[in-house]
Amino acid sequence: MLRFMRDEYDDPPLLITENGCADAVGEEALVDDARIRYCNDHIRTVELGSLLIVSFHPVRKLSILM
């Protein structure tokens, strides 16, 4: 999708306002490796796409309350 936007619309600046993955619950939530890996992979993929990303804000549970 990001490459399509780049190619079709002359590489516009993009604002990623949300992304996320399923959260663990209970004691499993203390081991957050899956979410950390997901966010790292997402950022790496965006970097490899050579796209101009103006801002990136990963979703947090508290962001829903604000």
Image: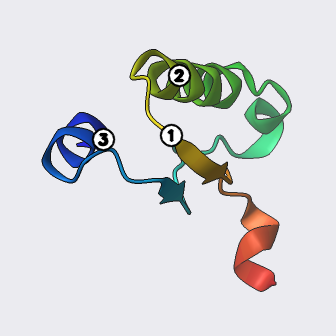
Instruction: Please state which of residues 51 and 32 is positioned toward the viewer in this rendering.
Output: 51
Q: Position of residue 43 (x, y in %)?
A: 58, 27
Give the Cα separation between the discs numbered 2 and 1: 9 Å
Q: Position of residue 41 (x, y in %)?
A: 54, 19
Instruction: Examine the rendered structure and indicate whether residue 54 appears above or below residue 7.
Output: below
Q: Are marks 3 and 1 in contact (CB under 8 Å)?
A: no
Checking the image for residue 26, the label placed there is none
Mark 2 or mark 3: which comes first in sequence? 3
Residue count near mark 1 (Cα–Cα under 10 Å), binned few <14, some 14–19, many ≥20: some
Instruction: Examine the rendered structure and indicate whether residue 44 appears above or below residue 8.
Output: above
Residue occupying image coordinates x 51% and y 51%: 19
Q: Position of residue 35 (x, y in %)?
A: 64, 31
Residue count near mark 2 (Cα–Cα under 10 Å), binned few <14, some 14–19, many ≥20: few
At label 3, the amino acid type is Leu
Mark 2 or mark 1: which comes first in sequence? 2
Residue occupying image coordinates x 55% and y 44%: 53
Which image quadrant is residue 40 in?
A: top right
Residue with the mark numbered 2: 47
Q: Position of residue 16 (x, y in %)?
A: 52, 55
Which image quadrant is residue 50 in?
A: top left
Instruction: Please state which of residues 42 and 23 is positioned toward the viewer in this rendering.
Output: 42
Give the Cα separation between the discs numbered 2 and 3: 11 Å
Checking the image for residue 52, the label placed there is 1
Q: Are marks 2 and 3 in contact (CB under 8 Å)?
A: no
SS for callout 2: helix
SS for callout 1: loop
Checking the image for residue 2, the label placed there is 3
